[in-house]
Image: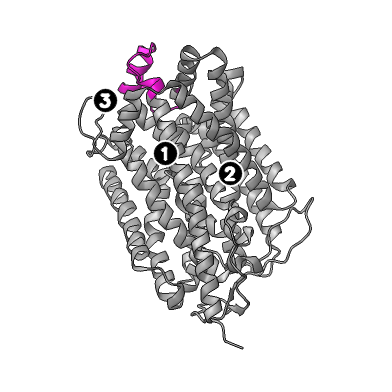
Amino acid sequence: MPEPFEILPGHLPPLESRELPPPPSSIRGLIGPSVIMMGLALGSGELILWPYLTSRYGLGIIWAAVIGLSTQFFLNMEIERWSLATGESAMTGMSRVTRHSSCFFLAAAILPFMWPGWAMGGGVIMQSLVGGSATTYAVASLILVGAVLTMGPVLYNTVERVQWVLMAVAVPGVVVLVISLAGPEDWWALAKGVVGIGTDLHGRSFWGLPEGFGEFVTLLGALAYAGCGGALNLAQSLWVRDKGYAMGAHIGRITSPVTGDTEAIPSTGFAFALTEEGIARWKGWWRAANREHAITFWIVGLSTLLLLAMLAHATLLHPGQHLAETRDALLSGELVGNIGFLTTEASMLSLRLASGVGLFFLVLAIFILLSTELGVIDGVSRIVTDILSVNVIPGTPVGRIYFTVLWVFIGLGVAIITIGSQLDPSLSQPLVLLIIGAALNACVMFLYSGLLLYMNWKRLPSPLQPSLGRKIALAWSSLFFGAFTIITVWNYL
């Protein structure tokens, strides 16, 4: 019997031998992990940060979103590569390179995402609709998300179904709104902005970057959230594993301690024999995974981002709009600390279409933020659980670790928006919370891109390694996010 490939095990047990399952005949059964990532992107960069930047500068800046999301496509696929080949997470693979990486990834998962901007965003919109306390609504949403994740029999299925519902409602809704509102001048501004020949609201070419430290940090965060963002990109390796991609089919899934049956989850992965059949199956899996991610994440995700930015342009900056005072406030920066531009968009939708359209937009925004909140909390809890179960407390039931981490993380979010906001009022402003987390996540992506390149290039056997083009793409990811990070730190200092 042919021997499976070997990798340097580091401080972890070596890979066991298993057969690589046959690749699927179509990608229909693979669609899911990228839907989760798209749902996460929809509630941060696509709904808030890029429309906010559009409201400040126009569509001349949107070229940066295209580059950011395209960069993340290649980054995500290299994160998937290790899991397809071994069934392990990318974090486990990197801990085989250096065991100290586990400390970095724990910090990278917790520190940027402990700022509950999605919860406060939904709370602020709820307050604008029905009154009451935004903080109370935010706390309630955190507890609701925890309950949903705890009660779902199979955790992955719960998260995927929520994101599918979101996509089914949000994407068609955005398309209808844009078609109803956007005129030829909006489409032309978008086309010029995508290829980098657009201008800002003062008629200046926008290959230049925003002036001022605060606005540059916002752009850095938007680049990180032009897609999933930061450590959450690494959760893609966990979601494809739970979906049963390639060698991930041999790994069990996390189930609810209340409603699910226990599934054994090995802490480390497997290797397959590099026979002619094994390599052919690998190529089939790699093509299918790339096709699924390209369609769902890059094509649909990028289209949704561009349409939401154009919706902001058509409602907030359209020459015929009536809310001139609000437009002046946007241009002067008075709405920097909050998400008032969303309620302004809703007002314009009601004025230009029908009275109920603005309400529909705000309710949809609440649902988007809530589903993003669910995906973020699940993703962070998964990453921390994977690191702890492999490197710190192996042998402990994975479900027990996950649900402990889940509720501790929710408790941290509650503390920040209740106690923290009392100490610093800016922590009650959703946009401030999102920008803090997003800027930190851009730094995280800069740091792990290089390690990911080394791991896939030097630790996997030759037939499974990235091509020259993929190596260049990972090097570009490190340089891209690294340059913005260094410029941001330099400006801060």
CA gap, disc 2 to disc 1?
18 Å
Q: Secondary structure at mark 3?
A: loop
Q: With 305 as the anchor, is 87 left or right in this view? A: right
| Nearer to us: label 3 or label 1 | 3
Disc 1 crowd, CA 10 A, few/some/many (<14, 14-19, 20+)? many
Q: What residue type is disc 3 on?
A: Leu
Q: With 164 as the anchor, is 426 left or right in this view? A: left
| Nearer to us: label 3 or label 2 | 3
Could you tell me if residue 320 is visible in this image?
yes
Residue 428's place in the image compared with 163, above or below, is above
CA gap, disc 3 to disc 2?
40 Å
Q: How many marks?
A: 3
Disc ID at residue 435: 1
| Nearer to us: label 2 or label 1 | 1
**Residue matched to label 3:** 201
Q: Secondary structure at mark 2?
A: helix
Question: What segment is highlighted magenta in the picture?
Answer: 314-340
Q: Horizontal and vertical percent for residue 130?
A: 61, 18
Q: Work out which quarter of the rendered image holds the C terminus and state it.
A: top left
Question: Farthest left residue?
Answer: 204
Question: Farthest bottom residue?
Answer: 1
Residue 461 lies in the magenta-colored region:
no
346 or 25, nearer to the observer: 25
CA gap, disc 3 to disc 1?
23 Å
